[in-house]
Amino acid sequence: MGIGVAEENEAELIAQAKKDPEAFGLLYERYVGRIYRYLYYRTGNQEDAEDLTARTFYRALKSLPRYQDRGLPFGAWLYRIAHNVVANWLRDRSRRPVVALEALGSSASREHGPLEALEEQEERELLLQAVRCLPPERQELLILKFVEGLSNAEIGAVMGRSEGAIKSLYHRTLVALRAALAGEERGGKGQEDG
Amino acid sequence: MDREKSGTRSPCVRDVLQRGEDEITSASLRELSERLQQAMRPVEPSAVFVRSLGRELVEASRRQRETARRLRRNLLIGAAALGSVASVAGVAFLLLRRRALKASEA
């Protein structure tokens, strides 16, 4: 799963993709899931995630002839493109992402009763909303860590930082998230009281 | 007791309280990390979307290569044409110059 563990023939495949459209198709198949998941959690809905996934791969296709292997995994290059695409998209539209309902459906809702499932969904929605209020690089870190299951070193390769810097950023992110959630809980209780 | 109230706890008590706070903090961060793990589950793109985008990209890649090939060929033809025009112009210039020299000698 790790992007650092590139398949043996990846460099060959990239070189081939510069000449052969079918080879680009293979690269696309290898990475489409990861890029989609990343964009899904950044945008919060399927439609925009699909749109931005398409934009990311079109941009990658256009830039591929200029791509040079500088020791970074190909996946890191793609994540960078996706990061820029989503940053432009957020700036252009100036809108806050919404939490998609389909994201809230979970296996837990089938395992427990409807009330527990609803509570779990609400809790999850609150958590994801808090995540989406974090600065972009912190969101990126959490997505790469929890959705993609990357190690700190691999996240560092994607985000252009050292492993130590990622570890420290992760800790600060958790602290900030906990503070934000505590604030929301206090706000919610205050509203109920008032 | 009075010392604690006035905020002048002994270093030992301070250390124990600090350690307790650190443990609470790290436990709550661990719990938050577990909640994130639960909430941020992997999602998959729809198979229809993956197939259709894949086809479009391969097609676009083909068009891009075709355009690049055509551009290279046109550049080559253009350069060859320019070279030919320059050669003809050079020969014409030399002929005219020679004729002019002959005329001036006569």
Image (cartoon, rainbow, N blue to C red):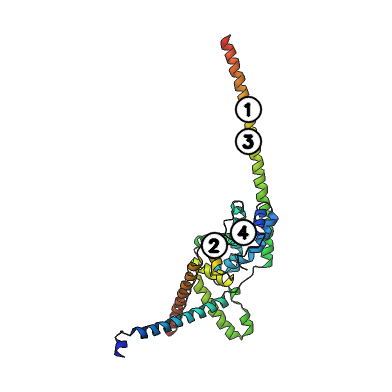
Q: How many marks?
A: 4
Residue B31 position, x and y percent, is 51, 80
* Residue matched to label 4: A57
Q: CA distance from mark 1 to mark 3?
A: 12 Å
- In the rendered structure, are the residues bearing label 4 and label 2 in contact, judged by CB atoms less than 8 Å apart? no
* Residue matched to label 2: A83
Label 1 amino acid?
A: Ser
Q: Earlier in the sequence, mark 1 or mark 3?
A: 3
For the N terminus of chain A, which image quadrant? bottom right
Label 2 amino acid?
A: His
Residue at 38% across, 83% down? B15
User: A140 or B30, which lies in front?
Assistant: B30
- In the rendered structure, are the residues bearing label 1 and label 4 in contact, judged by CB atoms less than 8 Å apart? no
* Residue matched to label 3: B79
Task: Check disc 1 and report its element: helix, strand or loop.
Answer: helix
Same chain, marks 1 and 2?
Answer: no
Q: CA distance from mark 4 to mark 3?
A: 34 Å
For the C terminus of chain A, which image quadrant? bottom left
Q: Is residue B86 above or below residue A168?
A: above
Question: In the rendered image, which quarter is residue A50 located in?
Answer: bottom right
* Residue matched to label 1: B87
Q: CA distance from mark 2 to mark 3?
A: 41 Å
- In the rendered structure, are the residues bearing label 1 and label 2 in contact, judged by CB atoms less than 8 Å apart? no
Residue B46 position, x and y percent, is 66, 68
Q: CA distance from mark 1 to mark 2?
A: 53 Å
Question: In the rendered image, which quarter is residue A86 located in?
Answer: bottom right
Is disc 4 surrounded by few (<14), some (14 to 19) or many (20+) residues within 10 Å? Answer: many
